[in-house]
Each structure stands twice: as C-alpha cells, then as structure tokens.
Amino acid sequence: MARLQIRNLEKTYANTFKAVHGINLDVNDGEFMVLVGPSGCAKSTTLRMIAGLESISGGDVVIGDRVVNRLQPGARGIAMVFQNYALYPHMKVRKNLSFGLRLQGASKAEIERKTNDVARILEIEELLDRLPKQLSGGQAQRVALGRALIKEPEVFLFDEPLSNLDAKLRASMRVRITDLHKRLKQEGMSSTVIYVTHDQTEAMTMGDRICVMKDGHIMQVADPKTLYDRPANAFVAGFIGSPEMNLIDGRLDGNQFHIGDQALSLPDELMARLQEPAGHVTLGIRPQHLRVGAEHGLKAHVTGAEFMGHEVVLHLSVADARLVAVLPAADYVDLERETAVTLNLDPGKAHVFDQSGENISLSQLH
Amino acid sequence: MSTPDTALTPASPTRVIILNPEDRRAERLSAFVRYTLLIVVGFIMLYPLLWLIGASFKSNAEIFNSIGFIPQEPTLDGYRKGWETSTPYTFGRFFWNTFLIILPKTVFTVISCALVAYGFARFEFRFKKLLFASLIATLLLPNVVTRVPQYILFRDLGWLDTYLPLWVPSAFAGDAFFVFMLVQFLRAIPRDMEEAARVDGANSFQTLIYIVVPMLIPALISVALFQFMWTMNDFLGPLIYLSSVESFPVSLALKLSIDTTEAFDWNRILAMSVLALLPALVVFFIAQRYFIEGISVGGVKG
C-alpha cells in the first residue's frame, strides 16, 4: 500500500536551466494519476525523478512513509514501463521478466511461479521463449508491462508507454492497462500508478485524476470531468478537449463582450459567476457549446466544414478570431464557404479568463 | 500498356524492370568491364601474397630464377628446415611465446577498455571532458615519443626481458583507440535498457555485466581482433623489451632467421612468414561477421 507525495520538487540542470519549479502533488494509494502536458513541460523529468533516474535538485519524493530522494531506483519500490519498451535484447522474454527477481536472489521456484502468473495475466505465455526482436510492438509492450508487474512494486511508473503503438493497438492497450489497474486494486495489491502522456485522450480515459503540467509548473490537478468542465486556467481549457476550446480575446464592458466591431451580450448566468466583470478578458467556449443559427449573437463566416459522420466540425471566422464549432450531423446542412451565420453560446458552459489566464468564472459553475 | 523498356507489375510492391535486348547487351558489357577491372586490380594487390605462398614451396635457388608464383618443383624443405630454426628452439616455441603475450593482452584490453568506455559514456564526473580530451590526445601522440620514458620505467621496475611491458599497459586501458571506439559504440546504444536494469535493482556494475557487455559484444570482438592482429604483428615492442631468444615471439623469430646466418635461406623465411600469417587469417575469418558489425556500428552511428 503506498501513497506518493511530491513536495516542492525542483530540477535544475547543470546549465542552470530550471525544468521543474517546486511542484507539489499527492497521489493516493491505488490511484491512477496521469501527468499530461505538451512536449517540454517536464512531465517525463518529474517521472524520472520519482524513479531515481534523474537527480533531484530540491524538494522530496515520498513513497509510503519513506523519503526516497537518496535511494537507488531499485530500492524505491517502483517499477517502470518505458516508451520504447527497453526490453533487454539479448534475453528471452522469460529472462526479461525475471531479471529483477534474479538480482534479488529469489528462489527458482518463486521466479518460475511469478513468471507464469504474470505471463498468464498478460496472455504472453506463448512468447516466453522468444527474443524481444521476435515480438511485435504490442507484444513487446505487454512484456514490458509484465516486467513491471512481476516486481509487485508499490508504485507503477509509465512513461508514454503507448506512443509507439498504432492507433488501434493503443486503444486496446489502454483498456488492458485500466483493467489491470482495477484488477490489482480489487485484489488488494499495490496499484498506485503515475502515467505520463502527451495524449489527452489517454489522460481523460485512463486517469482517476489528471495533473496538467506546463513549463515545469502544475496547472491543475483534478478528475477528468472537473478538468473538462471547470478548467482552472486558459491553458488547461485549451489543452483538454478535442477539438480544443475556442479562446476569444476581447473586452468586457458591463455584460457586453466586444470582439472587433461586434458585441455579444453575455448571459446573466455567466455574468453572475464573474469575479471581476470588466476589462480585457478571454472568453472560452468549447466547440460543442457554440450554437449556430441563433437569433442574436456574433456574426460569423464559414471558412470550412469537416463532415465526420456523427458530427460536423465547422470552421468559422469572427472579426480576426478563428473559431471551431461542432454540430451534430443531424443539424448539418451543406454550408458554402463565406456563408454568414449567427453564433451564440451555451450560457452554462462558457468561461471567462483574465489577462493572466486564470478562470474568473468558476465560483458558481456546476 | 507498358513502355518498351520498363514495365510495372501493379500488384507487386517491388518494381520489375524488363530490359530490351540492346540494353541487356550494354548491361552485360558494363558488367564485364567492371568485373575485369576489379579482378585485375585485385590480382595485382594480392600478387605479393600469392608469390609469398608459392615461393615458400620453392627451393632457395628457384626463388631467384623465376618471377611466377607457381613452383616448378614444389618442396616442403622450407617449412621443414624453417620450423627447426637455427636456434635450439623450434618455431613452435615462438608461436607459444606469441600466444603468451597475446592472450593476457587481448583479455585485459577487452576488460579494461570496456570499463573505461562505460565510465566515459555513461557517467558524469568532474573533469570528464578534460580526461576524455587527454585520452584522445594520447591517440595523436606518436608512439616513439613515449618509448624512452616507458623503457626507463619498465627497466626500473625490473620488467626487462619479461612479457609484462608488452601487456600490462593494456590492462589499464592503455589503448586509447579502443576506448574511443567503444565509447562511440556505447553512445549509439539507447540508455533505456540500462535504466530499466537500474529500476530492476541492478547496480552500475551489474548493469555493465548483465546489460551493457552483452550489447557491446560485436564491438568487443572487434577490439579483441584488432588487438590480436596488432600484437601478432608487433615487432618493435618485443625487440625493445625482450633479449633472450627463448622468449622471442614469432615476429622477432622471423628476423632472427635473417640475422643469424650469413647466407640465409629465403624459402625458410617465406615458409615461416606464411605460417605467421595463418593465425590472424583464421581468427579474422571466424569472427568476420562480428568484426564488421562492430566497426561499422561504432563508426557510423557515433
């Protein structure tokens, strides 16, 4: 049983570049925590500091009750799955799985039993006598997963484990990993997971909670629904959700939101939530929450349409801003380029961000 | 409809080119010219070796009478008498001496260079850049510059007329070229496997033994082969440090046959030269695959 705590964790490289800026994160026992963010946001560096593969410049990593800063990776009670599998090329799958146990001096019987158990769980029994080069990407990733599982660690660390797989395999491995996590949890085994990805779909579908990072800072930690419905700032709002949220810069005057030479009357419900209702702000509205063809609202021009089968992605321009709206396919009528439409927004779903990017419309949002 | 000289088979992923008769003739002529040229140049390059082998089966008189390499009256006289030498020892003794130098030198070179290269390629430590630069600098240093101080050092250690001066420097990664080669090879290998091993609980030394060395094997075989051949061919080292005939390696023994008799028999020397060539050739052909893999990966991806 292990809880993981990160306290004021910092990473400064020898060239004085500061990659991680004193972050704090608590991961509960058995929780599936996803670290997500764009490239260079230091999510992998953070994971590698937890693993002990990267030195810690400041702060503490606590696993269970132990500060593990100075412990070797092998003594931290962690197991890690790497992006490119990192299987030992000269060892057969069986030896790859049991390498850690052999180093610990486990008995032959125990090694045999655990190897077979893990192979059964991951359905890799028929691969045990193959070399890594004889495995497909999906099989190799299952073996890598097995190598982590066999150690029965306190915390599992995943470093973009699905990035090298094709889309279809990625989807099935996603389910396999989440199922495995649930199973470990049900069986009362340690199942705390830190999972690094740049793919927000993975983050949203797998994580109990998601930690969104940017430039070595944590932007928000929340469950997927909260993250989607109540983004703490414009970065999270733009990063989570597909297509990404429309962020429209403008000026707020009373309940009038000015964009270019147009003005949109913001709904009372939204105005009631605002903490500082004036000045330069960014209006955030998800493509799914834009209403096209309203009586009043912003005048927009259609610049393109993508028919996806179940929905239509409409590209629009309003003054200088480019917006995206997603409509159900049933509402789709063949719109020509440059067709003028009127846009309005779903009052309960819009957000307003101040100039620093903070969401100032969260207070009463449900 | 395909064009007259090329056609594409639509279902096949590879392009099939069908040549018309004129093109086929030109292609054949071109191949003929290329192969002839290569064979002629190859023959010229190999001729001294062929002559050496042929002449070793000739009588001493015939060697100077004909330029061809095929002996008119083949004889094993050169081999028989050459093997006996003009010293109390046979050539077998000199081969054994060579082996006594090569074995520790090769083994210790592989071990020490792998250790040092692992250090340079995988660890951060103070003055690493300076130390690596010094290592490379020793590569550029002419060998003769260090001969005298080395000789004095080994003399003071009482190592003259022993094999120690010939292999002990190699046991401390004295061959900068090999260290450099292995460092380049290691740089081309991703670190993930080693990190996975560390997460699995291996310390640095276990990671080296269980993970790095198996991945380095092609490069280590190249190192061993190079060292084997260079040591086999080394003449100056034994000449400087060894003075008793009983401890001479093959390279010195060959010269010995020229020194000791005034009118020496060339066929004996040539016969023993052929034998001296054999070990290196045999070892090279056995390990050729690894050897080429080792130097190409190390060299290209560095």
Image (cartoon, coloured by chain):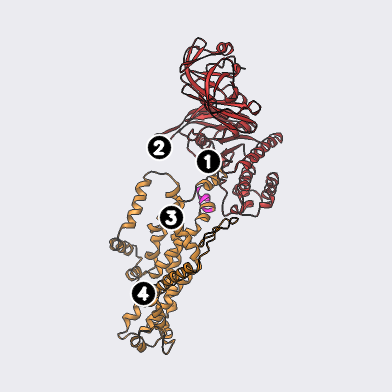
Chain colours: A red, B orange
- How many marks on residues? 4
How far apart marks 2 and 4 lie (CA) works out to 53 Å
Rendering coords of residue B83 (x, y %): 42, 82
Q: Amino acid at mark 4?
A: Leu
Label 3 sits on what residue type? Answer: Val
Q: Which residues are magenta?
A: B204-209
Q: Residue at x 40, y 64 (%)?
A: B167
User: What is the magenta segment's predominant secondary structure?
Assistant: helix
Alpha-carbon neighbours of circle 2 within 10 Å: few (<14), some, or many (≥20)? few
Would you say residue A189 is visible in this rendering?
no
Q: What is the crowding at mark 3: few (fewer than 14 residues within 10 Å), some, or many (at least 20)? A: few
Asked if the residue at tag 2 contacts the one at tag 1, i.e. Cβ–Cβ closer than 8 Å, the answer is no
Image quadrant in which the N terminus of chain B is located = bottom right
Q: CA distance from mark 1 to mark 2?
A: 21 Å
Image position, residue A152 (x, y; %): 64, 40
Residue holding disc 4: B252
**Residue linked to disc 3:** B300
Q: Of circles 1 and 2, which is in front?
A: 2
Tell me, yes or no, whether the highlighted magenta stretch contains residue B208: yes
Q: Which residue is mark 2?
A: A14
Q: Nearer the viewer, mark 2 or mark 4?
A: 2
Query: Which amino acid, by three-letter code, is at mark 2?
Result: Ala
Element under disc 3: helix
Residue at mark 1: A72
State the residue lying farthest toward the top.
A254
* Residue A273 in view here: yes
Q: Are marks 2 and 4 on the same chain?
A: no
Q: Chain of mark 1?
A: A
Q: Are marks 2 and 4 in contact (CB under 8 Å)?
A: no
